[in-house]
Image (tube, rainbow, N blue to C red):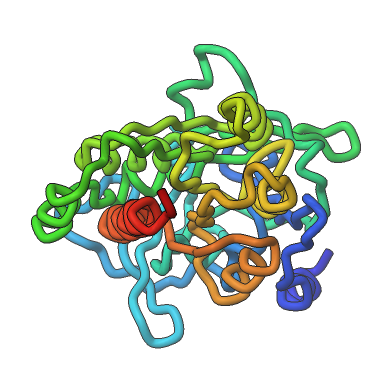
Amino acid sequence: MGQDTLFQEIDQRSNLAMSNEFEMLTFLLSDDQTYGLNVFKIIEIIETPKLITKVPHSHPNVKGEIDFRGRPITLIDIGEYLGMAPIDYEHAISYVLVCEYSNTTQGLMVKQPNILITKNWDDIIKPEGEIYESSCLTAMTWHQGDPIQLLDVEKILSDIVGIETKISDAAIARVKSLDTIKHHILAVDDSKAACELTRLVLSQMGIAHTVVNSAPKALDLLKSSLDANGHSPYTLIFTDIEMPIMDGFTFTRKVKSDPQLAKIFLSVHSSLSNKSNEEKAASAGANDFIPKFTPDNICNLVIRQIEKAEQAQHTEPA
């Protein structure tokens, strides 16, 4: 497939299907193995420019900054971060996947973009075992017998660029005025970095929380949590979009179509932070949408729902 054709297909396939499917761009790193990335994260693919501005005291896998449409973005050799030989961008043609994560833009340098394929999340397998717990591999699949590895790019970016984990003093002050003891938060995400951030934020708030790494596990947990009157202990659910087996849109529809679970406030919490995904989340029945890696946004949403729950309890007839 020619590069021009590939770029055109990415532009044409800008809508993520609402049927537990997604479109993936496969690409090669310097180890010549095949990796995959959801095309909805990709703004554009460009050849690695010759002019790269070095950034003093930056992470060793940050090659520098490049100009993208008149603004600087960070260029990262993700293969080098994973322990591979660095891409020789000065002497050979390589490419940059310009990607958006949680309202920020980065350039991920790859050896070669490959093909676009459509996969069902049922076909995406989450590796199990201790060896994967600390790795940056979040899932695997196959295409025509060849393995495709899906990287936990959020973890890679959190290690290289860093993420804010502390909630503000103003948010902490608001939390102190609430009775959090009766509330429990459920978070669903397969990204290790996102799970850790959610735990840190909710721990700072002093609120009980459960974090699971797959939507089917979360559904089972929700159903088993119902008491004899059909009430759930969960005040709020956060869900990612991209998850193996069942994506966040499908999970949201299943929760909101269950009469006993539908009343639980559900927010999509995703690095696919654009208007189109907000609209799709709302269409699936989500009550809200917040971008990932925004501690105060998480905190403030939880505060609002606890306040609403408390107000509703006080106005219920005796």
Residue 107 position within the rendered picture, expressed as x and y whole percent measured from the top left: 45, 63
Residue 27 position within the rendered picture, expressed as x and y whole percent measured from the top left: 67, 50
User: Which residue is situated farthest in the right direction here?
Assistant: 144
Foreground pick, 219 / 56: 219
Asked which quadrant contains residue 46, the reply is bottom right
What is the tally of numbered marks visible in this picture? 0
Q: Residue at x 52, y 67 (%)?
A: 98
Asked which quadrant contains residue 222, the reply is top right
Residue 172 position within the rendered picture, expressed as x and y whole percent measured from the top left: 14, 51
Quarter of the image that includes the N terminus: bottom right
Q: Is residue 120 visible?
A: yes
Location of residue 297 with respect to 72 vertically, above or below: above
Q: Residue at x 46, y 46 (%)?
A: 78
Foreground pick, 16 / 108: 16
Q: Residue at x 56, y 36 (%)?
A: 231
User: Which residue is situated farthest in the bottom direction here?
Assistant: 70
Residue 205 position within the rendered picture, expressed as x and y whole percent measured from the top left: 22, 42
Residue 78 located left or right of residue 307: right
Foreground pick, 41 / 300: 300
Q: Residue at x 78, y 50 (%)?
A: 20
Residue 314 located left or right of residue 188: left
Location of residue 145 with respect to 58 vertically, above or below: above
Asked which quadrant contains residue 69, the reply is bottom left
Foreground pick, 228 / 265: 228
Q: Is residue 63 visible?
A: no
User: Which residue is situated farthest in the front direction here?
Assistant: 318
Location of residue 123 with respect to 282 vertically, above or below: above
